[in-house]
Amino acid sequence: MLRSQEPATEAKKEILYSPPTHFISLSEWSSPRIRELLRLATAMKEAPGDYRHILDGRMLLMMFQKPSFRTRVSFESAMASLGGHSIAVDSAGTPWGSGRETPADMVRTVSSYVDVLMTRLFSHAELLNLAAYATIPVINGQTDLEHPCQALGDLLTLQDRFGSLEGLRLAYVGDAQTNIAHSLLDACSKMGIHLSIGCPHGKDYEPDRAVLARARDFAKGSGARLDVVHDPRVAVSNADAVYTDTWMSYQISPAQRAERSQVLTPFRVTSNLLRDAKPGAVLMHSLPAWRGNELDADVLDGPQSIVFAQAENRLHTEKAILLSLIR
């Protein structure tokens, strides 16, 4: 009897002390696990009352280096709607943010206070460092390299609109040296979505080469086709959905704006450009949008725009992420 109990005890120990699962990059999540997150998000969207107390007593800590509006509000709302609580902290006001405490000491400490940590950081490398020392799950709320929470919400939006993801054609137009473009590469290559990126020439505007290379490896398994072109009309040709994002992210200085605007203006999404996509193609944007820069106002506010449904779906997919990591 004792012998039969010993392996079970050891197995339990292994589960209790194994490193937590993080949500840092969609590149680390298999296609079946992404599909399960989407299935869970759909269930939570359709019957929110069924999940009202599922995270009772659980605590989320949100730490921000970057300004945040949608990410903070959606995660706070997600946690509260599941019965949990959240704390928001500006990292600049912490010993870690001021350089008086190591990231390891900070994250080890908060791992004993809360159940999950969501961070919005400038440096992806810094996020990886935090996750290496955390004993709780860590969620990437955005870094300079990736924005997986946004991309997961985008997948749910496309699934809601078209029913199936495999074989869809998505065009991303504009600055592709962004966390949005990188996470879309991961998402599309995992889920069999054909992605055509239309961007200016040069490393300042094209996707990170390492991210593109790994996405092309994933695409071999899913059947997705990934293209990077430098003509916006070629990019959107025959697309089911056209996606653009801000040209002026937080790290862009005022001195850079005039030059960037000149380079990117040919890639502005206009009603004329949308006509090169499929009839009835939809418009997507992660928000906030700058009308007159990356897209025209009549496009953002027009009948093809699904940007606010897209924004809402961040709430549902973040609920799914929280529940999947904490339970």
Image (spheres, rainbow, N blue to C red):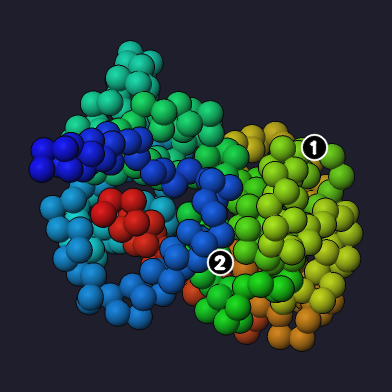
Identity, as a three-letter code, of the amino acid under mark 2: Leu
For the residue marked with disc 1, what is the amino acid?
Lys
Q: Is residue 84 left or right of residue 63?
A: left
In screen coordinates, is 234 left or right of 83?
right
Q: Which mark is residue 136?
A: none
Among the two numbered marks 1 and 2 on one chain, the one whose residue lies closer to the N terminus: 2
Between 62 and 46, the residue placed more toward the observer is: 46
Q: How many marks?
A: 2
Residue projecting furthest to the left: 1
Q: Residues within 10 Å of mark 2 (few under 14, many from 20)?
A: many
Using the image as rendered, state which of residue 34 and residue 62 is in the foreground.
34
The vertical placement of 265 against 271, above or below, is: above
Where residue 14 sits, quadrant-wise, is top left
Give left or right: position of 310 versus 260. Answer: left
Q: Give the residue drawn at x 36%, y 26%.
A: 133
Is there any visible trace of residue 184 in the rendered image? no
Specify few, some or many for label 1: CA neighbours under 10 Å numbering under 14, 14-19, or 20 or more. Answer: few
- Name the residue nearer the viewer: 286 or 314: 314
Residue 89: percent from left, percent from top: 29, 38
Above or below 247: residue 123: above
Q: Residue 236: image x %, image y %?
A: 80, 69
Look at the image and tell me in which quarter the C terminus lies: bottom left
Q: Give the residue at x 54% y 46%.
A: 28
Task: Give the residue number, with chain letter if any, for mark 1.
Answer: 203
Q: Label 2, on which residue?
A: 155
Residue ID at (88%, 54%): 230
